[in-house]
Amino acid sequence: MYKIVEKRELTPVIYKFKVEAPVIAASALPGQFLIIRSGENGERVPLTICDYDKEKSLVTIVIQVIGHSSRKISLLNEGDCITDFAGPLGNPAKYVNWSDADLKGKRFLFIAGGLGIAPVYPQVKYLKSKGAHADVILGAKTASLLIMEEELKEYADNLYICTDDGSKGFKGLVTEKMKSLLKREEGEAPAYDELVAIGPMIMMKFVTLAAKEFGIPLTVSLNTIMVDGTGMCGACRVTVGGKVKFACSDGPEFDAYQVDFDEALRRLGMYKEFEAAANARDTAATAQFKKLQVL
């Protein structure tokens, strides 16, 4: 059992948990994920690691309530325990294997949307510690859905906010802001050495399409497509460079220009019917519980 020592509501549907997990905290690296399970019959849920504190033996995760299992986990409180908390899994971000000399002075631009903001945080924090420069674009539909803005300000060289409705920062899509930052005069050196996009699959697809003309390496994280997290179920199969890969065991990060996003988007919709049925059962159970409380 893994004890929750801190719970924080980031938005009405997004929660941040700090969990006691000494082994994971001691070995976690940026870009990796873990599998959590609440209850003996709970579903395995893959979540990218949001932060880790080796000294305090704490691992931070962020979860958004979407379906049955995420709702069940969101109801846990400080002092409660998570049944399974396995990891770290997957390959770390590619630059983790670079030398400090190679990283120092490198310029990164992160494009993060929605829940994808959470896994960007440990990457920016790591790069800052190695002397690299990281700018971050955060995107959300509206200001109330932005998360971890203050935490990222501490480590990002520049933080750009984008909201669809213009309630905060730049009014428009993250792709528009990205293109304005990448634009340069003929013969001028690129503003960045590496691009990283993490967020909804559709966002990463259009970031990839928009970035291609600039010729800068772009990495995306396909964590949203994972199910089992060990390469056994095959649910996260994706075509990368014409070859079948597994997001969990071969990734979760890949060269964006090689990813077949249309296939990945179709795969994301495979379990919608099952999730809808589970949500319907949850709704009925919640209504019954509230009725009993009134009685």
Image (spheres, helix red, strand yellow):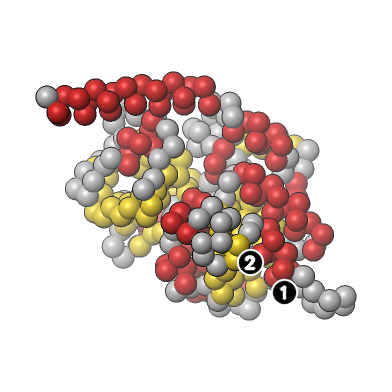
Looking at the image, is mark 2 or mark 1 earlier in the sequence?
2
Judge whether 174 appears above or below 292 on screen: below
Which type of secondary structure does the marked residue at label 1 adopt? Answer: loop
User: Residue 137 — which label?
Assistant: none
194 left or right of 170?
right
Percent coordinates x, y for residue 171 in the rendering: 60, 62
View extreme (left): residue: 295
Q: Amino acid at mark 1?
A: Ala
Judge whether 159 appears above or below 20 on screen: below
For the C terminus, which image quadrant? top left
Q: Residue at x 55, y 44 (%)?
A: 223
Residue 106 placement: quadrant? bottom right
Percent coordinates x, y for residue 141 in the rendering: 54, 52
106 left or right of 293?
right
Judge whether 123 appears above or below 184 on screen: above
Which type of secondary structure does the marked residue at label 2 adopt? Answer: strand
Tell me if label 2 and label 1 are in contact, CB under 8 Å.
Answer: yes
User: Residue 191 — which label?
Assistant: 1
Percent coordinates x, y for residue 169 in the rendering: 55, 67
Q: Amino acid at mark 2?
A: Leu
Packing grade of label 2 (10 A; few <14, some 14-19, many >=20) is many
Percent coordinates x, y for residue 181 in the rendering: 70, 70
Q: Label 2, label 1: how many angstroms apart (C-alpha)?
A: 9 Å
Please name the residue that numbered disc 2 is placed on: 109
164 left or right of 52?
right
Q: How many marks?
A: 2
Residue 237 placement: quadrant? top right
For the N terminus, which image quadrant? top left
Residue 42 placement: quadrant? top left
Q: Residue at x 29, y 31 (%)?
A: 39
